[in-house]
Amino acid sequence: MKKTIKTVRCFLCALLFVFSPLLKAQTGQGSNDHFREIKNQYKKIFGGETRNDSFSNKTTNIPLPLIKTHLPQWVVQLPPPSDLEIYTLGISDPGMQKDSAIALATLRAKALLALFMHSDIKGSSDYFISNKNLKTGEITASKYNEYTKIIGKIAFNNTDFKIRRDTFTFYKEAIVLASLHLAKPLSADSSLVACLGNVLGSYTTDKGKHAVLSRTELFSKAYNNNISTASIMDYIVKRVNRQIKIKSIYDRKQLPATSLPVFYQASPGDSLPGEKSVISNTLRYGLWNALSNSIICTLAYESKGDKARVSGLNDHYNQTLRDLTRIITSKTVSMRLTGLEVHNNTLQIHYFFTNKSQRK
């Protein structure tokens, strides 16, 4: 009987734990630190149930709630762009205060506009062979390095930049839909936005073992003629095999890392216009993590699709690296975002390029 009562108590506590954050989010009574509230609730409800002596020699892993959130339709499918107006999304980090989150999302929307309007992409790829079986031709050790730099700049009238829609998700991410009118000449009340994207990857194979290291960065400065200081954001993601480390900076302050995984309901993209990104990015670390990585990797991938300058060098550079093949690319593109596709908590963007020019 006691065991049955205890089982029922655990079940009721689990229901309360999962649904009470949803009720508070709907009634607007959630605390300022939403993630800390969930963790404290978790400890309070289940702490007493796991202090029994019978659990002392066991490891009990109780998962955090997988609360899947829907994205609004205007986030999934953007308005169609025209020659006079383009649209983009801006997204904050999870777990932020609403006012700061919307300000960061707005700055990131401007950064993406700079990339969409005019991206100057330069890249280099190096492929090394360090160990090759002369009899069989099998390569037992190799290394591939690639680096891509993406630079975007845009100047616009402040009155031509507008926030059309905004929302604040369950995970405290601000999402804004921004538009920019392109036809008007610049006035005294204008802004200049510069954006830099970096993609660095290293892939090593040695006797059947593989190692993957990558680093992506999106850095932006926004200058307003009426304000002496620039607004700055920097978002860096480092990956070593399956481990990931994120550093997010807004106005020269590092933002705290989120402590809970993010989950979003599926959103099919069958009706979305344009191409679909080759890479799917997990949403576990938030919408901006997936969106920004999708965009800069798509731009980097695009720069490798046309003609490139290829050189081969057979000299021995040192004891471990030889047979170098180097590929150099340079390109300028304009890009438009048409929508987002969510599947199995991963994100793919839909997009198209309005012009492509290959530089020699």
Image: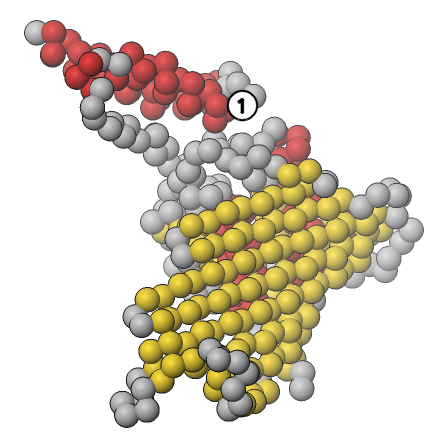
Q: Residue furthest left?
A: 1
Identity of the residue drawn at 45% across and 55% down: 240
Indicate whether 92 appears above or below 312: above
Eyeballing the image, is 156 above or below 56? below
The residue beneath circle 1 is 33
Please identify the quarter of the rendering in which residue 210 is found: bottom left
Determine the residue located farthest toward the right in the rendered image: 188
Depth check: give the residue in front, 341 or 319: 319
Expressed as whole percent of the image width and height from the top left, the position of residue 143 reads 45, 74
Q: Nearer the viewer, residue 285 or 353?
A: 285
Where is residue 39? Give x, y as percent. 42, 23
Please name the residue shown 36% across and 51% down the image.
343
Give coordinates of residue 245: x percent, y percent. 50, 47
Type of the residue with mark 1: Asp
Which residue of the protein is positioned furthest toward the top in this rendering? 1
Residue at the image point whose x is 64% and y is 78% from the top: 330
